Image (cartoon, rainbow, N blue to C red):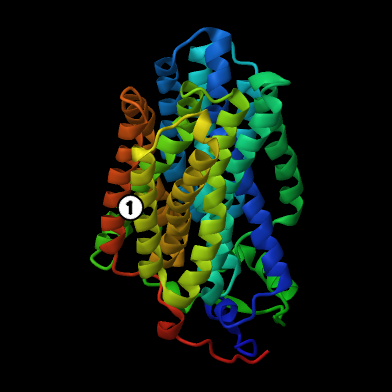
């Protein structure tokens, strides 16, 4: 392959080993999503403190959370298209700078109106980061490692959420919610400055633009390939879709999976944000201290880190269909158990353990869904496809503050019963997807290429 004048970049990467440099690039991409998850869930940790300082009740914060979800929905769609047109790296780092800077401004907010506007604008960056991170990490690695690499990247959403709970539990009693948002905004800006120097563009994206082939040659050499100075590039295996347009997502080949993915994201993200928006408030209302209530958010998210990594490993062996359906069923069972429990400080350990189980599996399904979406769509529309599915899912996020607040009015039984119902619908949508990630036995073995 290298000896030929025209190099098929996709096949070259897919048939090569997963090098240490590629793993470092995936880790760098994952860092942006840790920060995304952190900034996204700071508000849920801060709401009980804001309620006390401003003398407001829980429903007053529904518009704030709704505006943030609406911004993320719009940002996910726009960010995916920008990633396919301008490059994944530029769209990703631009998103990080946007949500970092606006989170710093949140720390100066003086009331609900300003807070609502800032969270809406921050949502553009928070939503735009994820589809580009998924596309970027998937295009750094061989196809056989793609589900694991994407999952390791997106699993950083609940990891960042766990950090939001931990940092909130430690900072809220000392520096208050303003200090919490100040720290949460400065960190992304500092990391973005570093990544601007060290993070390259996707090699598959560079292959589409002849003017950027010098960058591609340098990157491939860094990856260990011997590339002639006059080499030309193509990606023959994924050129069925030649132009970037959302209409390509509903062609006969992709229509069913696009609809099913959108439904999966809708119901799963509705469930995720019902949890992350209101778990600390639910626990505070049940008599838990502010710090302990914040740790409930950590429990809800941290199980997702473990579950998603294990799920990604199993997906590489057994495929995504069986793995994701079993995880969804486990989440439903956990929500049913929580709906029947008495929630209070006297049963703190059991409550936190069940939140870790249930939230962990919900987050694991949602996280591995990015690897599934990256598998469904070819390179030319990958960021657009992932971004569109996520943007549709954000409608569930937009509804989650109102729906979650409504459920809490009747207590924890309706709240967790609602989670069980929405995850059941997510399971049904996942089951209808045709192009699931195949297991190891069904996956073609890589060919040996000349090096």
The answer to whether residue 312 shows anywhere in this view is yes
Looking at the image, residue 228 sits to the left or right of residue 257; the answer is right
Q: Residue at x 58, y 80 (%)?
A: 12
x, y percent for residue 322: 36, 69
x, y percent for residue 172: 66, 24
Looking at the image, residue 309 sits to the left or right of residue 222; the answer is left
x, y percent for residue 206: 59, 64
Residue closest to the eye, 220 or 254: 254
Q: Residues within 10 Å of mark 1 (few under 14, many from 20)?
A: many
When asked about the image quadrant of residue 227, the answer is bottom right
Residue lying furthest front: 346
Which image quadrant: the C terminus? Answer: bottom right
How many numbered marks have been drawn onto this rendered protein structure? 1
Q: Residue at x 48, y 36 (%)?
A: 276
Residue closest to the eye, 206 or 441: 441
When asked about the image quadrant of residue 43, the answer is top right
Quick check: 137 above or below 128?
A: below
SS at mark 1 in the image: helix
Quick check: 176 above or below 267?
A: above
x, y percent for residue 202: 60, 62
Q: Which residue is mark 1?
A: 264
Which image quadrant: the N terminus? Answer: bottom right
Residue lying furthest top: 55
Quick check: 7 above or below 213?
A: below
Looking at the image, residue 376 sits to the left or right of residue 228; the answer is left
């Amino acid at each position: 392959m290298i000896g030929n004048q025209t190099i098929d970049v996709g096949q070259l990467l897919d048939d090569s080993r997963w090098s240490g440099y590629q793993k470092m690039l995936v880790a760098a991409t994952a860092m942006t999503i840790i920060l995304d998850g952190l900034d996204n869930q700071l508000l849920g940790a801060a709401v009980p403190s804001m309620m006390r300082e401003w003398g407001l009740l829980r429903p007053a914060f529904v518009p704030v959370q709704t505006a943030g979800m609406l911004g993320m929905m719009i940002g996910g769609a726009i960010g995916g298209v920008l990633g396919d047109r301008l490059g994944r790296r530029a769209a990703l780092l631009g998103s990080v700078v946007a949500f970092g800077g606006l989170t710093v401004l949140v720390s100066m907010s003086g009331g609900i109106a300003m807070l609502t506007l800032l969270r809406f604008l921050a949502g553009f960056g928070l939503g735009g980061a994820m589809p580009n991170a998924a596309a970027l990490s998937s295009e750094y690695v061989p196809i056989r490692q793609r589900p694991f690499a994407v999952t390791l990247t997106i699993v950083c959403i609940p990891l960042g959420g766990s950090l939001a709970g931990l940092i909130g539990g430690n900072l809220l009693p000392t520096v208050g919610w303003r200090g919490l948002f100040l720290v949460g905004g400065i960190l992304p800006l500092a990391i973005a400055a570093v990544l601007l120097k060290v993070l390259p563009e996707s090699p598959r994206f560079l292959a589409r633009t002849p003017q950027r082939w010098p960058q591609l040659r340098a990157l491939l050499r860094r990856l260990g390939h011997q590339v002639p100075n006059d080499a030309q590039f193509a990606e023959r295996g994924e050129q069925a879709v030649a132009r970037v347009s959302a209409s390509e997502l509903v062609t006969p080949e992709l229509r069913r999976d696009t609809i099913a993915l959108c439904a999966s994201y809708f119901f799963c993200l509705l469930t995720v944000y019902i949890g992350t928006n209101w778990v600390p408030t639910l626990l505070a209302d049940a008599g838990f201290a502010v710090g302990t209530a914040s740790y409930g958010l950590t429990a809800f998210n941290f199980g997702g880190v473990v579950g998603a990594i294990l799920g990604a490993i199993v997906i590489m062996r057994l495929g995504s269909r069986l793995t994701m359906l079993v995880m969804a069923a486990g989440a439903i069972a956990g929500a049913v158990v929580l709906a029947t429990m008495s929630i209070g400080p006297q049963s703190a350990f059991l409550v936190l353990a069940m939140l870790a189980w249930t939230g962990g599996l919900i987050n694991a399904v949602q996280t591995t869904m990015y690897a599934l979406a990256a598998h469904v769509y070819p390179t030319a529309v990958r960021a657009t496809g992932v971004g569109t599915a996520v943007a549709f899912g954000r409608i569930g996020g937009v509804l989650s503050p109102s729906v979650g607040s409504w459920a809490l009015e009747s207590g924890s039984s309706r709240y967790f019963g609602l989670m069980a119902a929405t995850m059941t619908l997510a399971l049904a949508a996942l089951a209808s997807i045709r192009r699931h990630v195949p297991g190891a036995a069904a996956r073609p073995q890589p060919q040996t290429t000349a090096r």
